[in-house]
């Protein structure tokens, strides 16, 4: 059973008419569960200069290698997706992003 919702975010870059780089964000709704970040995940992320702050579990069918998620009006970057063997879910270890202007 899914207890929460989030948005999976895909960013696509393109050049505008003045040849400037622009990004388009496409958000996809998904049901999810929020899980605790394990000590191991937190430690491994820290070794790479990252701070694991959120673990999101969702259906594998919903995830299409998006690089960001939005949960409770806050954006997170996907550090690592993990697909548990024998399950139809994916666990996304995420890092909180600062507000982008």
Image (tube, rainbow, N blue to C red):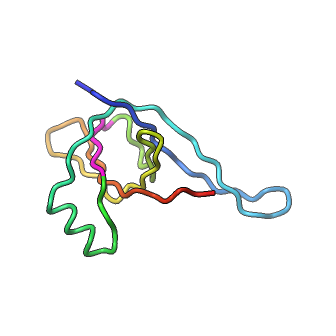
Q: Is 82 included in the stretch rendered in magenta?
A: no
Q: Is 58 included in the stretch rendered in magenta?
A: yes
49 up-or-down from 76: above or below: below
Span of residues in magenta: 54-60
Number of numbered markers: 0
Q: For the point 35% across and 30% down, which residue is it?
A: 31
Q: For the point 53% across and 39% down, which residue is it?
A: 27
The quarter of the rendered structure image containing the N terminus is top left
Q: Judge left or right: residue 96 versus residue 21.
A: left
The quarter of the rendered structure image containing the C terminus is bottom right
Where in the figure is residue 65, as x and y percent of width and height?
Answer: 41, 49
Q: Nearer the viewer, residue 81 or 94?
A: 94
Q: Quadrant of residue 30?
A: top left
Q: Judge left or right: residue 37 versus residue 92.
A: left
Q: Nearer the viewer, residue 46 or 91?
A: 46
62 up-or-down from 20: above or below: above
Q: Nearer the viewer, residue 61 or 81?
A: 81
99 up-or-down from 91: above or below: below
Q: Nearer the viewer, residue 75 or 15?
A: 75
Where in the figure is residue 28, as x and y percent of width and height?
Answer: 49, 35
Q: Quadrant of residue 13?
A: bottom right
Where in the figure is residue 6, as x and y percent of width and height?
Answer: 41, 36
Q: For the point 20% across and 48% down, which residue is it?
A: 36
């Amino acid at each position: 059973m899914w207890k929460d919702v989030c948005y999976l975010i895909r960013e696509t870059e393109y050049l505008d008419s003045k040849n400037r780089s622009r990004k388009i964000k496409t958000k996809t709704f998904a049901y999810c569960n929020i899980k605790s970040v394990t000590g191991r995940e937190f430690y491994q992320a820290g070794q790479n200069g990252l701070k694991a702050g959120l673990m999101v579990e969702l259906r594998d069918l919903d995830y299409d290698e998006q690089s960001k998620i939005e949960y409770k009006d806050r954006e997170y970057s996907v550090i690592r997706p993990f697909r548990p063997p024998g399950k139809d879910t994916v666990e996304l270890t995420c890092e909180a992003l600062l507000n982008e202007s």
